Every structure is written in C-alpha cells, then in structure tokens.
C-alpha cells in the first residue's frame, strides 16, 4: 500500500510538495540561495567531477564556500545539514546574505572530508536506489539496497520528478526491513505513462539517519511497455 503525503496545490491547480513548512530562508544561518534549475552537486569544482547529489529546482541551499574565481559554490543540501557538494554559481539565485563574505574553499572539500559528517564506524543504514523499472501496466517498481553498516526498519519516503522538473508523485512506500547489503524490490503503484528520464529520490524529508545522504537520488530512463 502507498500513502500520499505532504502535498499542496498552487493557484493554477498544479501539485507541489510541501517539503517542510518550518524550514525557510529566515531559519537558515548564513548565505542562502535557491536552485533555479535541477542541479548536480559534485565532489569538486568542475563539470567532469563526480556527482554526489542532485538539488531539485526551487530548493534552498546554504553556501559554505566558493572557488577562487567565484564560478563555483560549495553548498550544503539540505540547507540545515552539513552535507556539502560543489555546483556552478549560475544555477542559483541569492536569497539572503552576501556572497562576497563567503570564504574561498579548497577544491574537493565536500561532505566526504567534513569532520562533522557521520563516522563510517557508526552502525547506521544507508539506503540507495540501485534500479527502477516499469511493470507491463506502467506501475513504477524500485529496487532499494542498504549499503550501510546498520539495519533499517520502517517506511521510506519517495519522490518522483520528470526530467523537466515536474513533480509526479510524493509517497511513502511500504514498511520495509533491510539488513546491511540486502535489497528490497517495491512496487510503488505510481503509474508512468511517458518515456523519459525521471529523477527518483529516497527520504526526501531526511527522516532517516543514514551514513550518507548523497546517494538517495538517481535518474532512470523509464519506458512503458504498452
């Protein structure tokens, strides 16, 4: 069974997620910006660097550093966390604060080197999407693996967005028990009607404490069979 959660509607009737109504720019300390398009966060400045996370359009981030030329920003996402990655400056609009006061950060400084990040010795789960496909009726099925060191038991939040940034569905997938290095295959009951690239995110509201938050979002090419 799937449970739809945290949905609202805009004035024109479109569906949008209310990710957390208590987190706004005024609740975030420091320099705050908003993604103007879906943005890849990378482990170091440069478009050839490894992607470690994806920031959907309109999400808030906190700027924690910048490159010497100012073309790249090191940002925290979610904005209230200490998980960081690098992204091009042009992908964001400034909401509050002054980028001129942001310190120049060393290239490659990211959550992997952040001393405040969770120690890998902590027995925590780490959920990762390893596959997504469609059943003959168009129903989206996902495969989740626990690549962490601790077991997980509970419901997992899931968000599905089209390649164009349109929110397709927000739901809680069924109660799942995952021991380390085990996988679970879950039929989400979300119907996909068109062929295309879809962004699928686990635990969008960060309700699950994991070893890493950087592997919760993946893009998949989904092709209906009928």
Image (cartoon, rainbow, N blue to C red):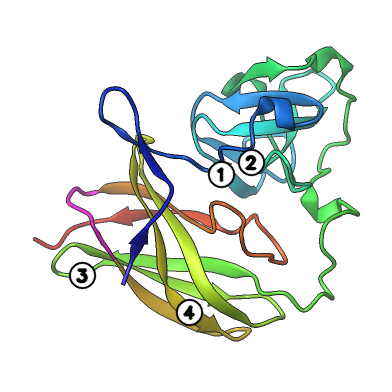
Q: Residue furthest front?
A: 22
**Of label 1 and label 4, which has the lower sequence position?**
1
**Of label 2 and label 1, which has the lower sequence position?**
2
Of badges 4 and 3, the one in the foreground is: 4
For the N terminus, the image quarter is bottom left
**Of label 3 and label 2, which has the lower sequence position?**
2
Name the element at disc 1: strand
Using the numbered discs, state the Cα–Cα distance from disc 3 to disc 1 in whole angstroms.
26 Å
Residue 21 highlighted magenta (yes or no):
no
- Residue ID for mark 4: 176
**Of label 3 and label 1, which has the lower sequence position?**
1
Name the element at disc 2: strand
Is residue 29 shown left or right of residue 7? right
Q: Tell me where the magenta segment starts and ends, as one range.
A: 189-195
Using the numbered discs, state the Cα–Cα distance from disc 4 to disc 3 in whole angstroms.
20 Å
Pointer 3 and pointer 2: residues touching (CB < 8 Å)? no
Using the numbered discs, state the Cα–Cα distance from disc 1 to disc 4 in whole angstroms.
25 Å
User: Can you give x and y, in whole percent of width and height, for residue 107 in the image?
Assistant: 83, 37
Is residue 192 shown left or right of residue 113? left
Q: Is 15 placed above or below 225 here?
A: above
Q: Residue at x 28, y 32 (%)?
A: 14
**Of label 4 and label 2, which has the lower sequence position?**
2
Number of residues whose C-alpha sits closer than 10 Å to that of mark 2, classed few (under 14), some (14–19) or many (20 or more): many
Q: Residue at x 78, y 16 (%)?
A: 97
- Residue ID for mark 2: 41
- Residue ID for mark 3: 135
Pointer 2 and pointer 1: residues touching (CB < 8 Å)? yes
Using the numbered discs, state the Cα–Cα distance from disc 3 to disc 2 in whole angstroms.
31 Å
């Amino acid at each position: 069974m799937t449970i739809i959660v945290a949905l609202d509607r805009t004035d024109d009737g479109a569906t949008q997620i209310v990710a957390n109504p208590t987190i706004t720019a005024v609740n975030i300390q420091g320099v705050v910006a908003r993604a103007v398009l879906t943005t890849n966060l990378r482990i170091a400045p440069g478009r050839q660097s490894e992607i470690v996370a994806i920031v959907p359009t309109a999400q808030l981030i906190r700027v924690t550093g910048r490159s010497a030329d100012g073309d790249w920003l090191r940002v925290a996402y979610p904005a209230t966390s200490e998980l960081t990655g690098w992204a091009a400056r042009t992908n964001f609009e400034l909401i509050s604060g002054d980028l001129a006061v942001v310190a120049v950060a060393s290239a490659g400084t990211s959550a992997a080197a952040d001393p405040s990040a969770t120690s890998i010795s902590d027995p925590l789960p780490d959920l990762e999407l390893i596959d997504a496909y469609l059943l003959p009726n168009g129903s989206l099925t996902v495969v989740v693996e626990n690549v962490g060191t601790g077991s997980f038991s509970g419901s997992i939040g899931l968000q599905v967005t089209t390649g164009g940034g349109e929110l397709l569905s927000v739901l809680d997938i069924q109660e799942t028990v995952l021991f380390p290095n085990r996988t679970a295959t879950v039929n989400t009951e979300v119907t996909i009607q068109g062929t295309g690239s879809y962004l699928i995110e686990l635990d969008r509201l960060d309700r699950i404490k994991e070893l890493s938050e950087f592997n919760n979002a993946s893009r998949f090419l989904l092709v209906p069979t009928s």
